[in-house]
Amino acid sequence: MSRIDITKVLDDEQNTEVPEIDSVSSSFLSDVQQAISQWNYVNKRTPSKTYKPSCLGCNRMMVYIRKGYEQDDTKSEYTGIGMADTGTRRHVAIQEVLEHMKDMGFNWEYLDVGEYVKKKHFEGKIPNTKVTDYRGHECHLKDDDLHISCMCDGIVRNTDTGKLYLFEFKNQISFKAQWRDKIDKSHYSQIIAYATLLDLDEVIMLYENRDNCELKCPSVYKVTSEDKRLFIENLRKVEEMAQENIIPAANKNSGMCKWCDYKSQCSKDGGAMKICDSSVSTQANLGLLQ
């Protein structure tokens, strides 16, 4: 094709008017979008009163969850639902591959977390960590002493060295994923929680760009004994607040606010620490629990 022909094609494309969508298609599109939102709303699970790794960055949210506060009665946008669903489905696909890597001759083995926990119990370790359920390849863990529950992506073992690693997978939009040469700081609390519950010290994070499925794997993250101590210490502190009916100060700098299900309650409680029970009113108690 000559240069003139190419220019004409480009000009034609630029001058082409966007066709008007007929009423039937417009109606169908609107109905599908609303149906996705409605279906997600009516099937929304009532959250358990246990701490979740995804809420560990906000002590106020943790107390709301632990006390069983009512969530906002809102419907999620269909786009957000779709992105979450994409992430879930990609988890399944990646985990299925991991499960067969050893059989295909690679030096990685995807372990059964339930069997791993049983072995740890036999060794007298992580006695409070329990496997309560499996959802596909993911394993639901719970610690009744720390009042925390989570879904674990898995544990992988290098068959050459015998070393075990916590495995965590994240599916992110491109502007986040393109910078994944390092672990996202917002994920630190989650992987420390998983590592503590499973008595593991090293973590392999696998990130996927949601737009083009490019994978990146930052350097192995090492969870220290101090990380685990501080994690447990904060859980204990928040649990004490919950038991004493104290609402922590709002985390105003948290990026978690956008996705929070307790915006109405948080706004109602104001920004400062709030004591809901008159029996806890001394400055000594405040100093202890801050």
Image (cartoon, rainbow, N blue to C red):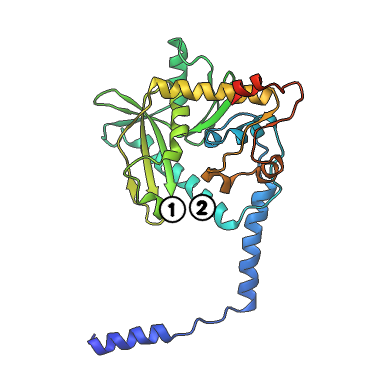
Q: Residue at x 30, y 24 (%)?
A: 163
Q: Are marks 1 and 2 in contact (CB under 8 Å)?
A: yes
Q: Quadrant of residue 269?
A: top right
- Is disc 1 placed on a helix, strand or loop? loop
Structural crowding at the residue carrying mark 1, measured as other residues with C-alpha within 10 Å and reported as few (<14), some (14–19) or many (≥20): some
Is residue 35 shown to the viewer in this render? yes
Q: What residue sits right under mark 1 in the picture? A: 173
Q: Secondary structure at mark 2?
A: helix
Dot 1 or dot 2, earlier in sequence? 2
Residue at image position (56%, 32%) is: 52
Label 1 vs label 2: CA separation? 9 Å
Q: Quadrant of the N terminus?
A: bottom left
Q: Quadrant of residue 69?
A: top right
Left or right: residue 186 versus residue 35 is left
Residue where numbered disc 2 is placed = 83
Residue 288 appears at what percent x and percent y? 60, 20
Disc 1 residue type (three-letter): Ile
Which residue corresponds to the image point at 68% horizontal and 44% vertical from the top-left?
Answer: 267
Left or right of 8 on screen, residue 229: right
Is residue 122 or residue 60 the one in the foreground?
Answer: 60
Q: In the rendering, at what x and y percent does residue 53 appear?
A: 52, 33
Q: Position of residue 252 (x, y in %)?
A: 57, 43
Q: Residue furthest front?
A: 283
Question: Is 9 above or below relative to 272?
Answer: below
Q: Disc 1 or disc 2, which is closer to the eye?
A: 1
